[in-house]
Amino acid sequence: MIWNKEIECMSRDELSALQSERLVKTVKHVYDNVAFYRKKMDAIGLLPGDIKGVEDITKLPFTTKDDLRDNYPFGLFAVPHSEIVRVHASSGTTGKATVVGYTEKDIDIWSECVARCLTMAGVTKDDIIQVAYGYGLFTGGLGAHYGAEKVKAMVVPMSTGNSKKLTTMMVDFGATAIACTPSYLLYLSEVLEQEGLKDKIKLKAAICGAEPWTEKMRKDIESRLNINAFDIYGLSEVMGPGVACDCIYHNGLHVCEDHFLPEILNSDTLKTQKQGELGELVFTTITIQGLPLIRYRTKDLTNIDYSTCECGRTSARLGRFKGRVDDMLIIRGVNIFPSQVEAALVNVKEVSPHYMMIVDRVNNLDTLEIQVELKTEYLTDEIKGIEKLTAKIGQVINQALGISAKIKIVEPNSLKRSEGKAVHVIDNRKIF
Ligand code: DLL
């Protein structure tokens, strides 16, 4: 089933005309209402009138996560606060969150996009869907929730955390769909097995995203639970989940291109890659009012295919994500930059700024250990003192990252020093 046939199956020419019209409006909107963009455009002598259509996109300046952080919290909003009905936030590179604001219309657009994705996954008003992304500042929970209500499914807002309750309700309610991270779904499949509930579920589809996963992992989930698993993509800055999703043919993720204009660029030269070539995904939002973004560098690596899909949709399809250009990690669905650990540790006087993050996946759950070096002057044999310090650092890290980590205090000068770029992460999950 297709949620919005007129748009999703529009001819590429018609779509391009629509995108051009919307891009022109967006550029004027940001020039008139966001000092940051006005300054950037003035600096290169670009006027809104110079942008006549999508073919002019490369004339526009880029936006990065740092720009959002530098304008924290509301500096890039393009409407007065009275027009904003909701905010969400995600991790910034050094502690400060990036904050996103939505007008009522933005929330409608978001729900429409998620509704399209859920429809690709076969979810209808007859389904019972458990939303097991986190609710709160993270966009996953509420984003999926509103989209699921839009398709008029029965929504069970589980959020994350209580896996036994979730699996029990999955059986008792006869849930037919679930939206959560792929690693959490693998974990849930184990819980179902342990609880002897696996044969009792009615699940048909899972809409998984928020972190990288492989085609092998998708197939593994499908065979373990006897369901169809779909890949949904999005990022808070550009709305949240629902920017793109794969259909029943699992041949790339259909972008909601009438709202988000994708480009794939070589991240060194910033030149457009050829169709099919791997590069950095860049988005320009063309209908968003609250926080419109021009050429936002997602730092996600993928490729694009503009051919019509077997399902009939004409929207461009993104290949499975192949990693990131920067050092952002996604641990238990939470975005983490090593620099956040560094920023947190400088506040702990007993330890040096040398640290190592060891990421792994045990029983399908991500684990994070942070090894921290004690300063020589605080070296002690007293176990109680070390335990206290470990707990203190644990708290500091939890506050900074939003997830817990196992803290291991190590002896002064024991962590390997690097001669080139410091290596702060060992990721044993081997996702890519
Ligand atoms: O993760 C939004 C979301 C929620 C997407 C629920 C899908 C489902 P952020 O926390 O801002 O937003 O993280 C965005 O997560 O730039 C990617 O690096 C990664 N990511 C999201 N979806 C996928 C996916 C949400 N399907 C960052 N495959 C993005 C690979 C993904 N990576």
Image (tube, rainbow, N blue to C red):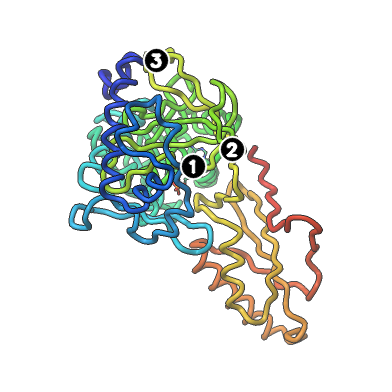
Give the residue pinned by disc 1: 297
Q: Position of residue 13 (x, y in %)?
A: 34, 14
Q: Which image quadrant is residue 246 in?
A: top left
Gap between marks 3 and 1, in whole Å? 29 Å
Q: Is residue 289 visible?
A: yes
Q: Please name the amino acid that badge 3 sits on.
A: Cys
Question: Where residue 333 sits: x, y (%)?
Answer: 50, 49
Q: Which image quadrant: the C terminus? A: top right
- How packed is label 2: few (under 14 Cα within 10 Å), some, or many (20 or more)? some
Compared to 299, does 160 lie above or below? below
Label 3: which secondary element: loop
Given residues 415 and 259, the one toward you in this image is 259
Q: Is mark 1 within 8 Å of ligand 1?
A: no
Q: CA distance from mark 2 to mark 1?
A: 9 Å
The numbered disc on residue 311 is 3
Instruction: Give the residue furthest to the left.
Output: 82
User: Mark 2 or mark 1, which has the lower sequence index?
Assistant: 2
Residue tagged 2: 267
Q: Residue at x 70, y 62 (%)?
A: 356
